C-alpha cells in the first residue's frame, strides 16, 4: 500500500510541475507583445462567449492567444486575405462587464465563420490598417 501511495504522489507532483510549465510558457507567450482584446466566435448568446486575450498581427495572418488557456500556441488564427469587416458597434448592456469601456466591437467574417473582436481606439486603427494593407487577391508576397 505504501508503494502505491508513493507512486500516486509522484504522479501528482509530476502533473503539477507539467501544469506549471505550461502556465509559464503561456505567460511568456502573452508577454511577448501584441494587442489586448476581447474575442468571441459567433453565433453566441447576447453577452456570452467573450474571451480575453492578446492578438498579434503577422505578415499573412492574425493570431489570438486566450489568457486562460494552456495551449502551447495560438488559440485561433485567421488569414488576412480571408478577413472581411462586416460592421462595427458599441458594446451593449449585457457586454459591459466583459468589454472594456470605450471599446468598439468589430464583426468579422473569415472563411466560413464569423466572430467579434472588441478593441480600443488605437488598436482598432491598427487592425483596420493591417487588413487594408493586404493587396486584394494576394495571399503571399511575390519573391523576386
Image: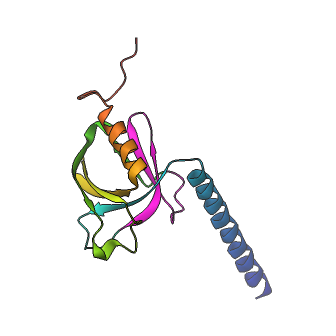
Magenta stretch? 50-73
Q: In x, y percent, where is residue 109?
A: 23, 50
Q: Count the marks: how many?
A: 0
Q: Residue, x 67% and y 65% (percent of image)?
A: 20
Does residue 83 sit above or below 6 in this rendering? above
- Give the image quarter of residue 105: bottom left
Query: Looking at the image, which is closer to me, 100 or 5?
Result: 100
- Residue 69 visible in the displayed image: yes
Is residue 111 within the magenta segment?
A: no
Query: Looking at the image, which is closer to me, 73 or 100?
Result: 100
> Can you say which quadrant of the picture contains the N terminus?
bottom right
Q: In x, y percent, where is residue 7?
A: 74, 77
The single residue placed furthest to the right in the displayed view is 2
Query: Looking at the image, which is closer to me, 89 or 22?
Result: 89
> Can you say which quadrant of the picture contains the C terminus?
top left
Q: Residue, x 38% and y 35% (percent of image)?
A: 60
Q: In x, y percent, where is residue 108?
A: 26, 51
Residue 13 relative to residue 49: left or right: right
Does residue 46 sit above or below 90 in this rendering? below
Q: Residue, x 30% and y 66% (percent of image)?
A: 91
Residue 34 relative to residue 123: left or right: right
Q: Residue, x 47% and y 59% (percent of image)?
A: 53
Q: In x, y percent, where is residue 31?
A: 60, 52
The single residue placed furthest to the bottom in the displayed view is 1
Query: Looking at the image, which is closer to me, 101 or 134?
Result: 101
- Give the image quarter of residue 51: bottom left
Amino acid at each position: 500500500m505504501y508503494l502505491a501511495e508513493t507512486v500516486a504522489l509522484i504522479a501528482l507532483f509530476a502533473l503539477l510541475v507539467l501544469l506549471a510549465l505550461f502556465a509559464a510558457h503561456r505567460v511568456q507567450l502573452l508577454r511577448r507583445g501584441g494587442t489586448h482584446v476581447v474575442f468571441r466566435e459567433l453565433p453566441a448568446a447576447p453577452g456570452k462567449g467573450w474571451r480575453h486575450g492578446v492578438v498579434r498581427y503577422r505578415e499573412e495572418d492574425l493570431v489570438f492567444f486566450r489568457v486562460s488557456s494552456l495551449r502551447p500556441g495560438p488559440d485561433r488564427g485567421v488569414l488576412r486575405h480571408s478577413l472581411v469587416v462586416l460592421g462595427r458597434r458599441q458594446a451593449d448592456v449585457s457586454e459591459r462587464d466583459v468589454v472594456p469601456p470605450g471599446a468598439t466591437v468589430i464583426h468579422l467574417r473569415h472563411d466560413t465563420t464569423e466572430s467579434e473582436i472588441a478593441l480600443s481606439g488605437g488598436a482598432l486603427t491598427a487592425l483596420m490598417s493591417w487588413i487594408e494593407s493586404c493587396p486584394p487577391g494576394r495571399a503571399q508576397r511575390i519573391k523576386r
